[in-house]
Image: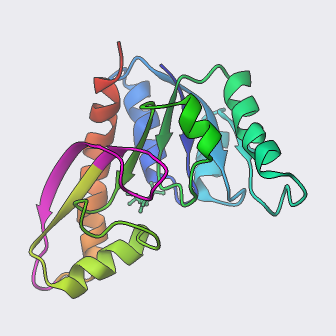
């Protein structure tokens, strides 16, 4: 597959995917990174690995209509001949036109066990804080298809881990990220022909 990764942050999942490609665990290739945040760590990782990146956000393109804005994404995806999209800590909604064009070809990883601890505002550290505050004893990761609602697409894969009584959001995040790095590429592999 010819993959486009969408990321907004540190990019540790992006890095783990690239590493699994370098080790030839995956046959796919990442040809493009799309980000809403041109200063994020994921961009640095793209540069280091000589992967093209494009920043698209409403500050860069304030005057575009909704349709023209979606077109920015679609034309980038077309230019790079992308056939699969992997969200790796991407904090924006995917444009409806992109969802339509890539139906069942966009996956996301979420740092908890959906359908709990998902929805608007539930991303990154917010998720781990909510998990700790709730008192649940198990958290984990969910990989799911992306649709028009935050974190509501069909679940593809889950793996759980313990929430320890002395965990804070940072120790829990560390344990969950370890699972993300270990399993995300394996889920991508399921989609390789
Ligand atoms: C990951 O924990 C990922 O599951 C989460 O953002 C983090 C990105 O880390 N995604 C979400 O919360 C999506 N709702 P990374 O930039 O180091 O890969």
Tally of marks: 0
**Residue at image location 74% in from the left, 50% down from the top:** 56
Where is residue 162 shown, x and y percent of the image?
Answer: 10, 67
Where is residue 190 shown, x and y percent of the image?
Answer: 28, 25
Where is residue 163 shown, x and y percent of the image?
Answer: 13, 73
Q: Quadrant of the C terminus?
A: top left
**Residue at image location 77% in from the left, 40% down from the top:** 72
Q: Is residue 146 visible?
A: yes
In this view, the residue farthest toward the top is 193
> Residue 174 lies in magenta, yes or no?
no
Between 72 and 135, the one lying in front of the other is 72
Where is residue 1 shown, x and y percent of the image?
Answer: 47, 19
Magenta part of the chain: 143-166
Q: Is residue 169 visible?
A: no
Between 60 and 170, the one lying in front of the other is 60
- Which quadrant of the figure shows ligand 1? bottom left
The colour scheme applied to this rendered structure is: rainbow
Is residue 34 toward the left or the right of residue 190 in the image? right
> Residue 145 lies in magenta, yes or no?
yes
């Amino acid at each position: 597959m010819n993959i486009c990764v969408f990321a907004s942050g540190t990019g540790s999942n992006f890095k783990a995917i690239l590493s699994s490609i370098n080790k030839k665990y995956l046959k796919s290739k990442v040809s493009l990174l799309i980000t809403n945040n041109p200063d994020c760590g994921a961009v640095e990782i793209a540069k280091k690995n000589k992967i093209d990146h494009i920043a698209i956000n409403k500050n860069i393109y304030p005057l575009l209509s909704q349709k023209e804005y979606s077109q920015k994404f679609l034309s980038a995806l077309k230019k790079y001949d992308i056939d699969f999209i992997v969200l790796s800590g991407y904090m924006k909604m995917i444009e409806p036109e992109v969802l339509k064009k890539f139906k069942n070809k966009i996956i996301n990883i979420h740092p908890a066990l959906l359908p709990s601890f998902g929805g608007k505002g539930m991303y990154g550290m917010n998720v781990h804080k909510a998990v700790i505050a709730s008192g649940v004893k198990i958290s984990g990761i969910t990989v799911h298809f992306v649709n028009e609602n935050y974190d509501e697409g069909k679940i593809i894969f889950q793996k759980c881990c313990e929430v320890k009584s002395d965990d804070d959001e940072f120790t829990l995040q560390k344990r969950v990220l370890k699972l993300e790095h270990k399993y995300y590429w394996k889920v991508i592999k399921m989609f390789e022909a």
